[in-house]
């Protein structure tokens, strides 16, 4: 609902994507041969062919772009690994010139990498794709094109797999969801292939599924395979971090850096990248937040699974490996003691050590952290250490402890996978306070809307006020307002327009719209704020965070067989992760927003229902048909995922409001608007006919 609330969550579908790719070199998808062709040029050619109706050419170029990107990574990995082995870095010596041996080995390794890469890749500069293109591949946008191209070519199996691959990184995309259901129905294909699946993540998930079914031997097989894959991927991630870095982001290098400043800057960026491999390897494709405690969880599952199959040596080994990350975990400490007791008289428990690879990784990770913090203190390098080993794994609802565990004897081992505690709200949640205005009609509360902190009201404004607002909207709204000028930020099938309170007052003061009408926008938003604060019984002031008059207009000729959303499912102060049933309250979400409201202005359009869903972004819990004077308000967190169904005919208009309890995040334009109103009142230019003071308070 909020502009920018989930970057990448609302995809700009193919009508906008050509703007994000580079022009194709040579204007086509040339025959293969010679150095590897850059994947961005192939991608551009594929998109161009798609919009030119050449679907076979589009599929060919897009497949080559995907393959080129994979081969580029493989070539870089191979060469950097080869040169690591062939050219060892020498240790610096004492005295003048003592660093020459070390720097000489650096030069030789650089030459080795260049000599290895150039025959296959050509000049390094050929493979520097724009950030927007890299983001498209990260979000798997090429697969969206591919599935449409394969549909046109009647290659349904390829289309289904491409759609599934895209969907795994974009689970909120309703159109793709529907496409997948259609594939399953028409072709009977149920087992779809994720072409970008990360094998260590697939093995981990399979191991957990077998564990939940108490199939412990299979769980061990997959979890051990997942660990092997994890450490292999970690090595690859470390190597790939040794590529180019972005010096322009570091302000302290605005001056001409000396040798050691330049080396330190580049190395700190490489080191930060390597340190973050822990997060990278724990993050599902297309997601922002990782599976918490991902690597330690492997050992936690394994220690219990090995116990259940009677291998107490392995159980103790895995328990000790887990304790490297969480040495104070009481459950696993007790388990380790229990396993030692079982081995007493047969094996000396002291000879059973944590796994070497876990010790090595953790030792390296701690040293990286130390160096980064030293750099942050001494060189002005901005760095904050994340909590990489949060004890509460992030997918607890998926990793339920088998019921048979509860039947273990009191002194038996336990899995440390306790339920992730429900976060305590930072305020007491209440509702049912007075509505303040006698004409406002209560319709439904949270319980009737199947949720938490929700209310539906009618008659917040009159029919005449709706018409007046609509008239002022037509005079002040700008296409793409609030979305950096993007006229179709959520779907290519609708045009989005908006305006702020300050802009309305400015136009009114300049005589471009009636001042009374501009003042009405200000007054009704204040009325809405008072109602929300009163109904939810807030014991502190509710401030405006953002106020936006918005209209969505269905574009003619683009509504047939449409099944996307006008605004994808999201939450207003956190990043919704439907697959994990989580909402991550972290930037770039507007984490300071506490309550939201939508005040509708009209009903003469088709579609456009406001919907609440479960956190899976699929299960609709309430659907609301807009009409003049109707207002829906709710708390802004993950408890209230919501979206807007497609507007298929006409124009849907509303006043969208977001509020905060933190005065530090008050809307700047609102403060300026307050000053304009004070000035107008002093000049006796008069308020609107609407009295926002609740003298008729109930």
Image (tube, helix red, strand yellow):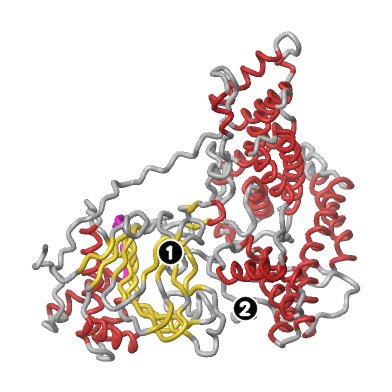
Residue 667 visible: no
Q: Position of residue 130 (x, y in %)?
A: 67, 71
Query: Which label is found at residue 14?
Result: 2
Left or right: where does residue 164 sit relative to residue 562? right
Mark earlier in primary sequence (2, 1): 2
Is residue 665 within the magenta segment?
yes
The C terminus sits in image quarter: bottom left
Query: Which label is found at residue 642?
Result: 1
Determine the residue positioned at 41% across, 43% down. 423
Is residue 171 within the magenta segment?
no
Determine the residue positioned at 29% across, 70% down. 631
The N terminus sits in image quarter: bottom left
Q: Is residue 104 above or below residue 562?
A: above
Q: Position of residue 633 (x, y in %)?
A: 31, 64
Asked whether the residues under the numbered discs 2 and 1 touch, taking CB atoms below 8 Å apart as contact, a structural biologist would say no
User: Element at badge 1?
Assistant: strand
Q: Nearer the viewer, residue 676 or 409?
A: 409
Q: Residue furthest left?
A: 695
Residue 297 visible: yes
Q: Is residue 598 above or below residue 217?
A: below
Determine the residue positioned at 58% across, 29% down. 404
10 Å crowding of disc 1: few (<14), some (14-19), many (20+): many
Please provide the residue range marked out in magenta: 660-669
Q: Position of residue 603 (x, y in %)?
A: 34, 81
Q: Position of residue 258 (x, y in %)?
A: 66, 55
Which image quadrant is residue 174 in? Answer: bottom right
Determine the residue positioned at 59% across, 67% down. 177
User: Element at badge 2?
Assistant: loop
Query: Which label is found at residue 207?
Result: none
Separation of marks 2 and 1 at Cα, in angstroms: 24 Å
């Amino acid at each position: 609902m909020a502009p920018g609330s989930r970057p990448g969550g609302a995809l700009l579908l193919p009508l906008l994507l050509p703007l994000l790719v580079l022009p194709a070199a040579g204007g086509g998808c040339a025959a293969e041969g010679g150095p590897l062709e850059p994947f961005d040029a192939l991608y551009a050619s594929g998109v161009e062919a798609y919009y030119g109706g050449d679907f076979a050419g589009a599929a060919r170029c897009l497949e080559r772009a995907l393959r080129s990107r994979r081969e580029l990574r493989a070539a870089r990995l191979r060469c950097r690994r080869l040169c690591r082995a062939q050219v060892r870095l020498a240790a610096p010596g004492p005295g003048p010139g003592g660093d020459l041996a070390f720097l000489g080995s650096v030069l030789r390794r650089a030459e080795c990498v260049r000599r290895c890469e150039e025959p296959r890749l050509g000049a390094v500069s050929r493979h520097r794709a724009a950030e927007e293109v890299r983001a498209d591949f990260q979000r798997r946008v090429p697969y969206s094109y591919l599935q449409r191209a394969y549909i046109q070519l009647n290659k349904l199996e390829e289309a289904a797999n491409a759609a599934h691959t895209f969907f795994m990184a974009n689970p909120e995309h309703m159109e793709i969801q529907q496409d997948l259901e259609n594939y399953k129905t028409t072709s009977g294909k149920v087992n779809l292939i994720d072409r970008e699946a990360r094998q260590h993540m697939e093995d981990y998930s399979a191991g957990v599924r077998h564990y939940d079914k108490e199939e412990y031997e299979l769980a061990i097989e997959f979890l051990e395979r997942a660990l092997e894959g994890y450490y292999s991927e970690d090595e690859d991630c470390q190597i790939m971090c040794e590529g180019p870095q972005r010096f322009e982001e570091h302000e302290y290098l605005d001056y001409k850096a000396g040798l050691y400043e330049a080396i330190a800057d580049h190395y700190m960026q490489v080191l930060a990248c390597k340190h973050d491999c822990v997060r990278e390897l724990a993050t599902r494709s297309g997601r922002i937040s990782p599976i918490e405690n991902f690597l330690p969880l492997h050992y936690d599952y394994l220690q219990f699974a090995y116990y259940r199959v009677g291998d107490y040596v392995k159980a103790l080994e895995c328990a000790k490996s887990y304790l490297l990350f969480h040495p104070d975990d009481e459950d696993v400490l007790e388990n380790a003691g229990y396993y030692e007791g079982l081995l007493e008289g047969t094996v000396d428990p002291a000879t059973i050590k944590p796994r070497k690879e876990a010790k090595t990784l953790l030792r390296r990770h701690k040293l990286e952290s130390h160096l980064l913090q030293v750099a942050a203190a001494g060189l002005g390098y901005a760095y904050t250490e994340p909590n990489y080993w949060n004890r509460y794994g992030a997918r607890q609802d998926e990793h339920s402890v088998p019921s048979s565990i509860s039947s273990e004897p009191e002194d038996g081992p336990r899995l440390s996978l306790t339920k992730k505690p429900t976060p305590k709200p930072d305020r007491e949640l209440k509702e049912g306070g007075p509505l303040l205005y006698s004409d406002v009609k209560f319709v439904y509360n949270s319980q009737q809307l199947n949720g938490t902190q929700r209310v539906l009201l009618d008659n917040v404004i009159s029919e005449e006020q709706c018409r007046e607002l609509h008239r002022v909207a037509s005079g002040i709204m700008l296409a793409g307002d609030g979305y950096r000028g993007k006229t179709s930020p959520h779907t290519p099938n609708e045009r989005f327009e908006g305006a702020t309170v300050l802009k309305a007052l400015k136009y009114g003061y300049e005589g471009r719209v009636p001042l009374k009408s501009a003042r009405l926008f200000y007054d009704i938003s204040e009325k809405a704020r008072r109602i929300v604060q009163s109904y939810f019984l807030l014991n502190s002031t509710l401030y405006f965070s953002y106020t936006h008059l918005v209209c969505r207009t269905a574009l003619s000729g683009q509504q047939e067989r449409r099944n996307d959303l006008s605004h994808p499912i999201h939450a207003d102060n956190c990043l919704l992760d439907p697959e994990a049933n989580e909402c991550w309250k972290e930037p770039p979400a507007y984490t300071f927003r506490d309550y939201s409201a939508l005040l509708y202005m009209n009903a003469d359009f088709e579609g456009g229902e406001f919907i609440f869903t479960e956190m899976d972004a699929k299960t609709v819990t309430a659907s609301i048909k807009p009409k003049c004077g109707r207002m829906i308000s709710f708390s802004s967190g993950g408890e209230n995922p919501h979206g807007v169904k497609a507007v298929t005919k006409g124009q849907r208009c509303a006043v969208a409001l977001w509020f905060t309890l933190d005065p530090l995040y008050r809307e700047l334009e609102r403060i300026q608007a307050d000053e304009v109103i004070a000035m107008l009142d002093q000049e006796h230019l008069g308020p609107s006919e609407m009295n926002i003071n609740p003298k008729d308070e109930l």
